Amino acid sequence: MAKTLAYKILENHLLKGSLIPGTEITIKMDQTLTQDSTGTMVYLQLEAMNVDRIKTELSVAYIDHNMLQSGFESADDHAFIQSVAKRHGVLYSKPGNGICHQLHLENYGIPGKTLLGSDSHTPTGGGLGMIAIGAGGLDVAMAMAAGTYSLTVPKVLKVDLKGKLRPWVSAKDVILYVLQQLTVKGGVGKIIEYAGEGVQSLSVTDRATITNMGAELGATTSLFPSDENTRDYLAQQGREQDYIPLAADPDAVYDEVLVVDLDQLEPMAAKPHSPDNVDSVKNIGPIKVDQVAIGSCTNSSYGDLMKVAQILKGKKVHPDVSLVISPGSSRILAKLAENGAMADLILAGARIIENACGPCIGMGQSPKSGAVSLRTFNRNFKGRSGTLDAQVYLVSPETAALSALTGVLSEGLDSGLTLEPIPEVTFTPNDNFIVYPEGTNKENTPVEMGPNIKPFPRNNPLGALLAAEVTLVAGNNITTDDIMPSDSNLLPYRSNVPYLANFCFSKIDKDFAGRCQKAGASAIIGGENYGQGSSREHAALAPLQLGVKFVLAKSFARIHRSNLINSGILPLIFENPEDYDALQLGHILEIEDIQDQLEKDIILLNNRTTGREIRAKGNYSQLEKEMLLAGGRINLISK
Ligand code: MIC
Ligand code: SF4
């Protein structure tokens, strides 16, 4: 039978189960990546699993998020990660090397391989034809320990690309258009596979921009075929030997198809405060811009920054605009310095900041009050920039650079300006930022543990009766940034969950943590797509620390649902979404005989305050039930 590319790669890695959508499979995981803001939990968990050497072909620990080092905390975290990496055979990428996804693409991604990363944008690797999946830290620790990963088989949605993009329209506009069509929950339970003649005109880094932001669709992952452009990209990085051609069978049948006509696409922007709130730049109009930020794992490639340099060369950034640029990697930064483009950026008036996540995760560069900030990033959730009333728009590098000059949101199509294609380059291979774990092991390398690193919270096995007070009724599309905010004040505490928990939901409800502490046992009520966004386990661990027993929602985002189960917190789905309307703060919900009910299709909750019964679905796999009964995955493993 003709196969999609996604299923071909999954089949090559299949260890258990079969490729039937909705069922559970276990696959071989070839590679893993971690970054520092989720990594401390990953490596605490890996240590708790008591393994010696990792079982993957390659695992890399990157440091890119927590770079401010305004106190000892982050530097301690880096040292901790470096020490555990050495103990178990993990490569360590020092701070200064760049953003994990950009670096993995450049140095280690291989067509046809599988990659699991403790960061939701791991699907960036799909630009090289990998099955690259974002997951919670514990899942990544398990993948390192066992070399495997279990997941629910997704459906495959084909995005059929026709034609070719015009200059001034780029990969970011493609994914923004797809987000407009499918919304932030349109990819849930799906792999997005790109195909069609339009693929040929997209470079690997263009493709990576598109697969990166597949995370915003809620998709399990996104991927492109591996073709001559893939070979060229690998050759530029000095790794042509890693190339293999890969594509779907020509007559492969897909579960859904979306056709995108690249010729017709215009520059797009995601308006505040959601990546799917998309319109064309033309329709939005020339709004005044205060800040422009170019970079992040979505748009910080060499090609992107060369286009920006071309637009800015010999010009002057508008007096009212602050332009900040963060390159994706040390290799890109070095190349821009060598070929003079860095001088073009600086002389135009750009602030060059560290090649790291930086402003994308609120680590500095928060815009002024009420500012309009154009960002080439992937998320514009309210408050994520660090300024609660900022209006963040997501745009392409071309739109960002041009707007930085004009001072208003501008697009290049009608500007009369030309934009030349970027000539190909070869990069100087350089691994001076990599620490190899050769000769180090558990015996000769102690764990380096700073005082801010606290043990992660553990849950208790499920008792017969689960009773909890409703301490939050949340709306639709609650993000993990809402649940466990991240900014320069909080990110240094990612390895200190007891402290971090005090700030759980603090940006939308300051009293939440206090209410939970009073209630003892809590329940959260959510709308659709609860927990979208980041892979941070802290969005489950902080609620666990505060005594949250279950979350009852209309639907869940994939990674957050797994993180809840890993922590022993029950994600429950309303059978009748209208039941949501009758729930209020302070209601007491009870689940009797929970052990037996877990085996049933419907779990009954009793609202003791109103006397009403609520029917909910768990849809748990066998393993998930065992984890919930044990009070989380680590408890189950220790059993
Ligand atoms: C993000 O973009 O939200 C992050 C920060 O990279 C997260 C990881 C984290 O919260 O540490 C992600 O996308 O998974
Ligand atoms: Fe870093 Fe932003 Fe990418 Fe997350 S989305 S990995 S914070 S650059």
Image (cartoon, helix red, strand yellow):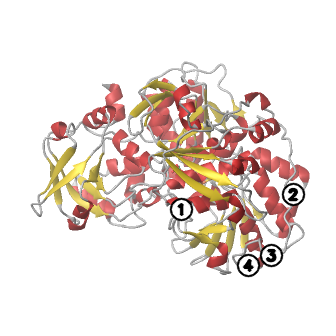
Q: CA distance from mark 3 to mark 4?
A: 14 Å
Q: Secondary structure at mark 4?
A: loop
Dot 4, how many residues are within 10 Å of its Cα: few (below 14), some (14-19), or many (20+)?
A: many
> Dot 2 corresponds to which residue?
341
Q: Which residue is mark 1?
A: 181
Q: Which residue is mark 3?
A: 415
**Residue at mark 4: C-beta within 8 A of ligand 2:** no
Q: Is 519 drawn above or below residue 636 in the view shown? A: below
The answer to whether the residues at label 3 and label 2 have Cβ atoms under 8 Å apart is: no
Q: Is residue 359 left or right of residue 189?
A: right
How far apart are labels 2 and 4 at the CA level? 22 Å
Q: Nearer the viewer, mark 3 or mark 4?
A: 3
Which secondary structure, mark 3?
loop
Query: Residue 407 has which mark?
Result: 4
Q: Residue at x 34, y 41 (%)?
A: 565
Q: CA distance from mark 3 to mark 1?
A: 27 Å
Please tell me which of labels 1 and 4 falls first in the chain.
1
Residue, far left: 611
Task: Point out the tag, 3 or 4, that comes first from the N-terminus.
Answer: 4
For discs 3 and 2, the disc positioned in front in the rendered view = 3
As measured in the structure, the alpha-carbon distance from the residue carrying label 1 to the one carrying label 2 is: 36 Å
Q: Amino acid at mark 4?
A: Gly
